[in-house]
Image (cartoon, rainbow, N blue to C red):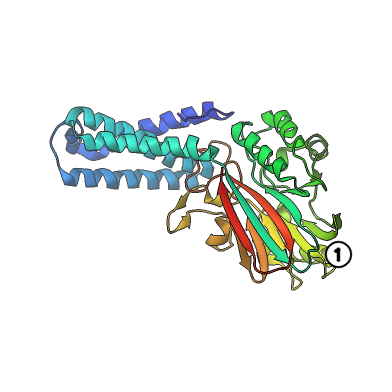
Amino acid sequence: MNFYLNAYSKSNFIIDVIVIITFILFLFVSLGNKRKFVFSKEWDLSFYKRILILVLIYLALASTIPFFLDVSSFIRVRIAWTVLTIALPLIGLVHFVFSKRTFFLFGSIFLVCIKFYSEVWEPNFLDVERIQIRSDKIVSPIKIVHISDLQTDDIRDLHLEVREEANRFQPDLILFTGDVMNHASIYPIVTSYLKEFKSNNGFFFVTGDVDHILRYTDFSKKSGSVLWDRKSKVLQVGKNKIGLIGLGLPDYRNKTLIWSLRREIPEDIYSILISHYPDSVLHQPNEKVDLVLAGHTHGGQVQVPFFGPILTLSKVPRHIAAGGLNAYKNTDIIVSRGLGAEGHVAPRIRFGARPHLILLELLPANSTKETAKSGI
C-alpha cells in the first residue's frame, strides 16, 4: 500500500493489511460503548482525546512487542507509518461519511498528502550541494564528487540526474562511501549505471551496511570502481598529492588501524578519510586527517524543523549527522544524506532530508571556506 513497488512489495502489503485490521479491531474494542461516535453526528471532545491516547498506546505496543520478540526494527517503523498514513485516514473518512464534519475529510487528505510527499515527491527531489574548502596543502583546484547510500530498489530519473550532474562537474575523483543497493536482483543495472560515471583520477569505494551482497571483485570490474577498504595511498591529482585513506565497514572505530593508515600519509599532504560511518571522526589518532567523507545517516531520512533528524544511528552530534560540511575538533567532515532509503520492509520515505549529491572543490588557501547550495 505504497506509491512505489519493489522486491518487498508483497511482504509490505501483507504487513499493511495485518496492521490495518489489528489497529481497527484494537480501536473498536478499546472504545467500548463510545464507538458509536464514529458512526454519528454527535461531537464529544473527550472521545477524540481517547482516540488519540489509544493510537499512542497501539503504536507503543506495536513498537515494543516486536522488539521483545526480536523482530526487525524495519517492521516497527513500517507499523507506525501504516497506522499514521493509511489506518488513520481510513478512520477519518469513515467518520466524515457519518458525521459530515469536513475536519475529518481534510485531516485524512492531509495525512495521505504527507504519505505522497514523503514516498514520491521528496525522494525524487535532488539536492546538489556545492562545497569549497581551502587549504595551504592544495596547489591547484581539485574537484571531487561525493556519493553515498545509493541504497536503491531501481534506477530512475533521479539517478540519471545525479550522474548527469556529476559528469558535468568533470571531477578529478569520485568517492563513494558505501551502501549500494537494497537487494541483489538489481545488481546488473546498478553496476551498469555506476560504470557511466566519469572521473579523471579514479572512482574509489568503501563498503557500507548492505554491501555484503556484493561480489567485490566483480563489482569493482563492472562498476569501474576501486575497493578502498583498509587502504592508504598518496595519489597524484594534477599538480597535487592527495592522501586517500579508506575504512571498511567494521573499521570505523579501530584506532590502531586508523593510526597505521594515517602514518602512511606525510603531514604536508592533504589527507582525506572515506568511511561509511561518520563516527570515524570520533576515533582519530592525534595526527588527524584534514577531511572525513561519510554517509550512513541518510540525514535521518526524517528531519523536524528547528530540531533536525529524529534518528541518525550515529554518535556524532546531530548537526553533523544531518548532512553537509561541519568541523569536529579541527577536522572537516562532510556527511552525505545519501540518495536512497532504508531497505527491506522499511518505508522508503524522506521528509526534510532530500537526496544529496555533493560536488566538492579543494582550493589553494586564500581566505575562508565557502559553501554554496543549489536545489535541482
Q: Looking at the image, is 374 positioned above or below residue 92?
A: below
Q: Quadrant of the C terminus?
A: top right
Specify whether residue 182 is in view: no
Residue at 73 percent across and 29 percent down: it is 188
Specify whether residue 34 is in view: yes
Q: Looking at the image, is 63 positioned above or below residue 36?
A: below
Front one among 356 and 275: 356
User: In terms of image quadrants, where is residue 112?
Assistant: top left
Residue at 86 percent across and 64 percent down: it is 264
Total numbered circles? 1
Density class for disc 1 (Cα within 10 Å; few <14, some 14-19, many ≥20) is some
Asked whether, in this view, residue 219 is left or right of residue 367, the answer is right
Front one among 284 and 163: 163
Residue at 74 percent across and 52 percent down: it is 143
Furthest-bottom residue in this view: 286
What residue type is disc 1 on? Glu
Residue at 71 percent across and 56 percent down: it is 361
Asked whether, in this view, residue 144 is left or right of residue 150, the answer is right
Residue 191 at what x, y percent from top left? 74, 34
Front one among 227 and 268: 268
Which element is circle 1 on?
Answer: loop
Q: Quadrant of the N terminus?
A: top left
The residue that disc 1 covers is: 264
User: In terms of image quadrants, where is residue 360?
Assistant: bottom right
